[in-house]
């Protein structure tokens, strides 16, 4: 796999800025120290009009005409992306996924369009060897509009030797959980609703309370969790990984492969995970 200067971490985040250059964020508490949360119009999430990659707006990165490994994180508050890599002459380059949130896949998965929800991470190989020196490859968000459609670009700076390859087998130690291994099935609904001090997010009809535990599991047990949401929202589990079993009764999507800790639910969609 590509390594060294051809292995790039990319944290994508959208932000909004005030006229003085400070971050503009509709927090209930401008100090961000006492009261959590945002003003009600932003309960579905805060979208910015500037796309940052590693803290820089719409950067252009020089690369060799070779394979690169991109370790991508969606660090946005609420923005979803569908990423594609487009050359100056309109060709779409393959995005070869080799890893998900918690490590390598068992085998590569090739995408032309890669969905990316907040908190999701993808490990991707892109091959610039067929792109002319001096030209650009633009990374575009198909879900964006105006300037939020552009994410970043790669400028092909030079020809170069490349002895990297993508193995057919990437990992052989992923958990082989089966539905029949599960000792129980749990249902979780994620919806907006009335809380003590206005509207907020509810899980199973209840607001978050750090003093309450909703689930008690036994170490070593395997469980199936059924998740459903009424908005487009990523669901993240802490401290564990899971495999996606199904989406609304159908097989998982190609980007659901591997060991994950975050899964994106569209409005009204249900997802089964095993962990």
Image (spheres, helix red, strand yellow):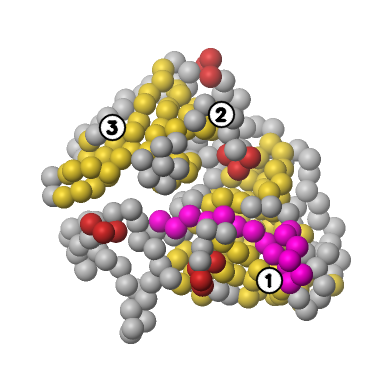
Which residue is labeled 2 in the image? 250
Q: Measure how far apart labels 1 and 2 are at the Cα level.
A: 37 Å
- 47 or 57: which is nearer to us? 47
Which is more toward the observer, 84 or 175? 84
For the magenta stretch, what is the residue range? 78-93
Q: Which residue is mark 3?
A: 204
Image quadrant where residue 129 sits: bottom right
Disc 2 residue crowd, few under 14, some 14–19, many 20+, Cα 10 Å: few
For label 1, the crowd category at 10 Å Cα-Cα, with few meaning under 14, some 14 to 19 and many 20 or more, is many
Taking the spot 60% from the left edge, 43% from the top edge, the residue there is 255
Q: Work out whether residue 15 can be spotted.
A: no
Q: Horizontal and vertical percent for residue 30?
A: 21, 68
- Mark 3 surroundings: few (<14), some (14-19) or many (≥20) residues within 10 A: few
Query: Residue 125 placed where, x, y %?
Result: 71, 54
Instruction: Residue at 35%, 31% (x, y): give it.
Output: 188
Q: CA distance from mark 2 to mark 3?
A: 23 Å
């Amino acid at each position: 796999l590509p390594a060294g200067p051809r292995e790039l971490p990319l944290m994508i985040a959208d932000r909004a800025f005030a006229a003085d250059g400070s971050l503009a964020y509709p927090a209930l508490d401008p100090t961000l120290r006492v009261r959590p949360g945002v003003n009600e119009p932003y309960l579905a999430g805060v979208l910015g009009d500037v796309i940052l990659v590693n803290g820089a707006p719409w950067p252009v990165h020089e690369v060799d005409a070779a394979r690169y490994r991109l370790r991508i994180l969606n660090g946005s508050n609420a923005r979803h992306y569908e990423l594609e890599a487009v050359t100056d002459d309109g060709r779409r380059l393959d995005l070869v996924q080799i890893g998900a949130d918690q490590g390598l896949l068992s085998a590569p998965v090739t995408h032309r369009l890669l969905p990316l929800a907040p908190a999701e991470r993808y490990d991707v190989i892109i091959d610039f060897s067929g792109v002319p020196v001096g030209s650009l490859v633009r990374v575009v968000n198909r879900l964006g509009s105006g300037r939020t459609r552009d994410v970043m670009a790669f400028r092909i700076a030079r020809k170069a030797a490349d002895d990297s390859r993508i193995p057919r087998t990437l990992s052989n130690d992923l958990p082989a959980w089966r539905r029949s291994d599960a000792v129980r099935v749990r249902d979780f609904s994620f919806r907006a609703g009335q809380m003590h001090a206005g509207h907020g997010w509810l899980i199973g009809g209840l607001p978050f309370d750090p003093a309450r535990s909703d689930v008690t599991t036994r170490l070593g047990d395997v469980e199936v969790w059924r998740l459903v949401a009424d908005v487009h929202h990523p669901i993240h589990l802490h401290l564990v990984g899971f495999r996606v079993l199904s989406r609304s009764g159908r097989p998982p999507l190609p980007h659901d492969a591997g060991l994950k800790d975050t899964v994106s639910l569209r409005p009204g969609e249900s997802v089964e995970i095993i962990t």
